[in-house]
Image: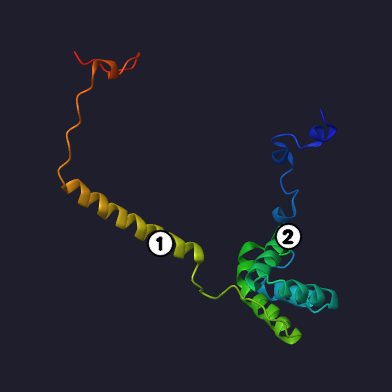
Amino acid sequence: MPASMFEAPIPGESLTVEPGGRPWEQPAQYNTVEEALDHYITQMSSDEFYDQLVEVLEMGVPVTTLVDIIQTSGMMNGKHTVDVGILIAPALIEMIMLIGDTAGVKYTTGLDKKEDPERKNNVNVALARKELQEELDNKSDEPTEEPEEMVEDEMPKGLMARRTA
């Protein structure tokens, strides 16, 4: 057996950590929206963050996706609570859009209400089903031929076959 198989976590091991042993189980480092925004704006002001953000925006990653990642990461690391993360999201979107505009990057916000191709495909499937159902309904109105009686050789056989007489 490969050695890596024995290096895997034991089932239920995640339930054995002491309560309060994870960062998100501790009191948040930043309790208010203002404190959390100050933290993120300071981080976003660094040249390293600026360069990485511009690179990611050029790849076509939507701004809303970046904000979701940033605020979820902050919550998981114990920087702020879930509710503070939700409240700072619009300000983070605006900050990232400002950085993208300053760098001259064409970015997608993720806020646009575009026609979802999956939804459009579902509409086509629904229309095709409706037409097929109408055809079946029209054919059911026509008289149908009665099935011929089975010959002795064609009678169903076997343990679960119906008895006819």
Can you give x and y, in whole percent of width and height, for residue 134 in the image? Answer: 25, 55
What crowding class fits label 1: few (fewer than 14 Cα within 10 Å), some (14-19), or many (20 or more)?
A: few
Q: Kindly identify the amino acid type of the residue bearing the numbered disc 1.
A: Asn
Name the image quarter holding the C terminus.
top left
Front residue of 18 and 94: 94
Residue at image position (74%, 73%) is 40
Residue at image position (74%, 86%) is 102
Residue 1 is left or right of residue 99, and the answer is right
Say which quarter of the image contains residue 154. top left
Q: Secondary structure at mark 2?
A: loop
Say which quarter of the image contains residue 162. top left
Can you give x and y, in whole percent of width and height, for residue 53 in the image? Answer: 76, 74
Identify the residue position indicated by label 2 in the image. Answer: 78
> Which numbered disc, 1 or 2, marks the residue closer to the eye?
1
Identify the residue position indicated by label 1 in the image. Answer: 124
Check contact, mark 1 vs mark 2: CB within 8 A.
no
Residue 3 is left or right of residue 160, and the answer is right
Q: Secondary structure at mark 1?
A: helix
Say which quarter of the image contains residue 15. top right
What crowding class fits label 2: few (fewer than 14 Cα within 10 Å), some (14-19), or many (20 or more)?
A: some
Q: CA distance from mark 1 to mark 2?
A: 46 Å
Residue at image position (35%, 60%) is 127
Can you give x and y, in whole percent of width and height, for residue 72 in the image? Answer: 68, 62
Residue 107 disc label: none
Front residue of 79 and 132: 132
